Amino acid sequence: MKPSWVSASIKEIFEIKYGKGLPEEYRNSSGSVSVYGSNGVIGKHDKSITAGPTIVLGRKGSVGEVNLSTESCWPIDTTYFIDSFPCDLPPKYWMLYLKSLKIGQHDKSTAIPGINRDDVYGIKVPLPPLNEQRRIVAKLEKLLSKVDACKERLEKIPTILKRFRQSVLAAACSGRLTADWREKNPDVEPAEELLKRIREKGRQSNRRHAISIEKININNSFELPASWSFATIEELEIFIGSGITPRGGKSVYRLQGIPFIRSQNVRSTGLVLKGVAYITSEMHNRMARTKLKDKDVLLNITGASIGRATYIPENFGEGNVNQHVCIIRLQKEVLPEYTTLYLNSPIGQDLIFSTQCMSP
C-alpha cells in the first residue's frame, strides 16, 4: 500500500442499492432514460430511479458485470447500483476498479448464480487520494483508448490476410510469382510437351465420366507465360467422382472407424478433421468407388462451401467422402498441391462459379 493510500471496505465508502423491476410492457420506449440489466442497457424509459451518474453491478444473470451510466438511469431488479459518490469520488475510477475485481465470477456455491450485497460490502479496497484517483482515470482513458485502437486494427487482420492470400494465389496461378525463376531456367520442358504426354495417356485409358466438374476449362482470360499451357481438368485426371448419401443418414455415423469426409472438413487451408464423422469398414467397402488415396484432390460441389478445395496428405490412411465432396484423382505428372492452390485462387474460383461449371 502506498503511504498516502488507506484500506477501506466498500461499505465504508458507498451505499449499494437494489434495482427495481420494470417489465418491458411498462417501459416507454420513446423516452431518453436508459434501462440497465445485469449486462448493460436493455431498453429506454421516460423516468429514472437514480440520482445521477450510476455504477450498475450485475446481481443475477450476468453476475458481477459492471457498467457506468453517466446520467441518471433505471437499473432493474437483477442489479445493484451506486449513485452516490461522497466527496466527489470519480464514478469512472470506481467503475473500473469494481470491474477489475471480477466480483462473483468465482462463486459456484449455488445452482442459481448471484452475489450477496453483504459480500460486496465486505470487500476491502485500496483508497487513493482524490486527486490521484482522477489522475489514474485520465491515464487509464489514454491507455485504454490505445488498447481499443489496437483491438480495432487486430480485428482487421483476418480480412487483410485473406486478401493477401488471394493476391498471392492469383500471382502464383498466372505465372507472375515465378517469373524470375523462368528467367534463370529457360531450358525447362514447356508445359505444352507435358500436356501432350498427359493427353496421350488419356486416350489410351479411354476415360469416360459424367460429373460436371470435368467441364472446368481454363480459358485465355489472361496472358500465359510462354512455357505454360491451358488444359481442362478432364485432361489431367484419371478419376473423378463424388460420394453418396449413406442409407440411414447421420444414424450410420460412428465415434470411430473409417473417416468420412464431409464438406465441413474440406477447407482451402487444408483438411480439417475436427468433428469428422466415421463409418464402419463394411460401409466403406460398399462405397469402394470413392475410397480415398493419398494426394486425391477434394472439391466441395454443393452447399454453402461450394468451390472449397484441399487434398489428402500422404500417409492419411483409409477414408471416404459423402455426396457433397468430389474426388479429383490426377495423373502423376500433375501436382495435387498446385491444383488445389489453383482451384482456391481467384482465377479458379471464378471458373468454378461460371455458368459452364457448377452452380449452388
Image (cartoon, grey):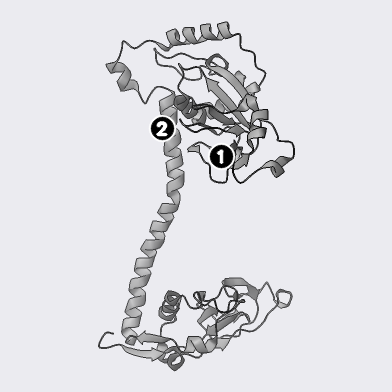
Q: Secondary structure at mark 1?
A: helix
State the residue position of label 2.
168
Nearer mark to the viewer, of 1 and 2: 1
Image quarter hosting the C terminus: top right
Please tell me whether residue 150 is drawn above or below residue 266 in the rendered image. Answer: below
Which residue type carries mark 2?
Val
Residue plotted at (41% across, 88% down): 88
Verify CB contact (< 8 Å) between mark 1 and mark 2.
Answer: no
Image quarter hosting the N terminus: bottom left
Which residue type carries mark 1?
Asn
Please tell me whether residue 322 is drawn above or below residue 234 in the rendered image. Answer: below
The image shows residue 8 at horizontal and vertical percentages of 38, 91
Q: Nearer the viewer, residue 235 or 34?
A: 235
Q: Secondary structure at mark 2?
A: helix
Disc on res. 265: 1
Quick one: label 1, few (<14), some, or many (20+) residues within 10 Å?
many
User: Toward which corner of the image does residue 135 lie, by quadrant?
Assistant: bottom left
